[in-house]
Amino acid sequence: MCGRYYIDTEEENVKTRAILAELEKRRLPMHEQVRGGEVFPSQIAPVILSEPDVGVTVRPMKWGFPRVGGGLVINSRSEKADFTPMFQKAARERRCLVPVSWFFEWQRNSGKKTKDKFAFALKQAQKNNLMYLAGLYGQFLGGFEGSGYDGFAIMTQDADAQMAPYHDRMPVILTDEALKKAWLNPAVPYAELRAAFETPQLAIRAVAPDERVPA
């Protein structure tokens, strides 16, 4: 599960600043709504993708696919994304990378979330490095070019030993440069990519508890 994450926008974070500068340069719809700091579902965030006439670039997207009947779906199970109706087209044709500095999860007690909140980042990351989560995106109400919007979901997989005390799922984190490049290439089959998913070592630290227990 990945229900919140953080984008560190401090001046020394070169990669983050470059992404934000590219968004400002492109001036696509919703770019002025892009958030730094803690990002919640339904908010607008920068997402990396490959566009046919542009190449690898960044686009502002809303976190979540709209659910029939209301609400948003913010995660996609990687084990079945390629045959789930909501995500199967995106798994083949619309893959993206979600840049984050760290993501959050909450300690559980008897299966229920507590207020105790933890941040997860790459163990070997330097302060100005980013982590890239595998994502899928869709175009809704005509997409951003048709006065609608693009929405993204974050891929998840079974938790490994380091994540299991906090949740039974974890985001798919891509660290290998060749794998990140292949993820953005729709010519590479989804099944081939999924077989190469990694579970990198994470640094885990406690952060200030939420005032309310999150859903």
Image (cartoon, rainbow, N blue to C red):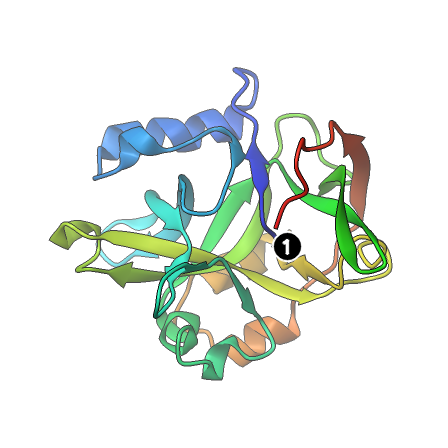
Task: Residue 8 in the image: state x and y as whole percent.
Answer: 56, 27
Q: Residue at x 82, y 59 (%)?
A: 164
Query: Along the line of sight, which residue is nearer the eye, 93 or 170?
Result: 170
Please tell me which residue is depicted at 51% across the width and 23% down the height of the picture: 9
Lateral position of residue 93 relative to residue 77, left or right? left
Q: State which quarter of the image contains the N terminus.
A: bottom right
Query: Position of 152 compared to 139: left or right?
Result: right
Left or right of 11, for residue 141: left
Judging by the rendered image, the residue that carries numbered circle 1 is 173
Asked which quadrant contains residue 146, the reply is: bottom left
Q: Above or below — where is 147 with respect to 17?
A: below
- Residue 163: give x, y in percent of width and height: 80, 55
| Residue occupying the far left of the picture | 146
Quadrant of res 167: bottom right
Instruction: Answer left or right for 139 relative to 125.
Output: left
- Vertical position of residue 72 compared to residue 131: above or below: below
